[in-house]
Structures are given as C-alpha cells and as structure tokens.
Image: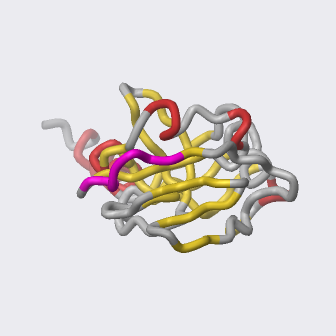
Amino acid sequence: MNKKVIPMIKELYPYLIIIVLVLLIRTFLVTPIKVSGHSMDNTLQNREILILKKYDKNIKRFDIVVIDINGEKIIKRVIGLPGDKILYKNNKLYINGTYYKEPFLVKGTITEDYKLDSTIPKGYYFVLGDNRANSADSRIIGLISKKEISGKTDFALFPFNRFGKI
C-alpha cells in the first residue's frame, strides 16, 4: 500500500467512529420525530419536532407514544393499559370504574360517550389524541399492540420557543 494512503486512512478513523456511533444511537436509542397533523393539539403542534426515546418501552398511563402502523408514524396518548376497561360517559373518563382527570386536555374538550366492549388484552393499549374531535385513534383504528409502539416522547426540540420537556 502507498505510504501516503495509510496516514490518510488513520485520519479518517475518528470520523468513521462518529458516523457509526450516530447511526447506532439513532437506530436503537433516540431519533427526532416530526408531528404530522393536529390530533394532539394543543399539547403538540403540527410540524413540531420531538425526541423519540426508542429504548423506553415502559409504557404508563397518559404517556405520549409514537406508533408505527404500516410504516406511518402517529403520535397518541396512552389512556388504557392491558387489563383495563375504558368508559367515557358525560365527558368523563372511567377506567375500571374509577374516574380519572385528564389535565392535559384543553378546557372545553369534548370526548363523546364511548365504551370499550371488553378488557384490554395483554400486550395492547388504548390510545387517544388530545384533540378528540380530530383524531384517528383507538376509537377508530382499534387497540394498539406493544409491537407497534416505537417508543415514548416527552421532549420537544423545535420550534425553539417550545424547547424542553412536554
């Protein structure tokens, strides 16, 4: 090998390592995700850029999750967990017969009466958009499998006036 080529290859090592690290982080840990649409208004805004935590699969009630349905990413809020029974009556949420406040909803948000006919099976979740009048969510598309959940998000990157924890 040419003696000039070897030092040049050695100079490229740090850059190659950085590229590999960025690809690994983006593939397995975190990646930016763009909000598309208005189903999560006013919590999230259309075109807002968030950080998706791919490593965080510990899903809790009211977490905001990114769901991959046939290659399309949608963002929703987890309302029902495995084993739950969900009922909306008179614009109030009841889970397993207990009333739950939804402090993330804008005052005046209406959730039409809805009853999930069965208990949520293991490995599935009931999700809704915060903008209930403009959201294709579990009321329409059904329960979401844990396998379809790419991860959780709770941090906004852009626009800069919204930068930080959601």
What count of labels does the image hold? 0
Question: Which image quarter holds the N terminus?
Answer: top left
- Across and down, in percent, residue 68 comes to 40, 37
Colouring scheme applied when the structure was drawn = secondary structure
Residue lying at 75% horizontally and 61% vertically, measured from the top left: 163
| Residue 71 shows in the view | yes
Residue lying at 37% horizontally and 43% vertically, measured from the top left: 144
Q: Compared with residue 24, is residue 104 higher up or lower down, i.e. above or below? A: below
Which quarter of the picture shows residue 99?
A: bottom right
Q: Camera-side residue: 111 or 30?
A: 111
Residue lying at 53% horizontally and 73% vertically, measured from the top left: 98
| Residue 24 shows in the view | no
Q: Camera-side residue: 14 or 92?
A: 92
- Across and down, in percent, residue 135 comes to 64, 35
Residue lying at 48% horizontally and 56% vertically, measured from the top left: 86
Magenta stretch prevailing secondary structure: loop
Question: Which image quarter holds the C terminus?
Answer: bottom right
Q: Seen in the image, is 60 located left or right of residue 155? A: left
- Across and down, in percent, residue 54 comes to 39, 56
Q: Which residues are magenta?
A: 115-121
Which quarter of the picture shows residue 41?
A: top right
Q: Camera-side residue: 34 or 16?
A: 34
Residue farthest toward the left in the current orientation of the protein: 1
Q: Seen in the image, is 100 located left or right of residue 13? A: right
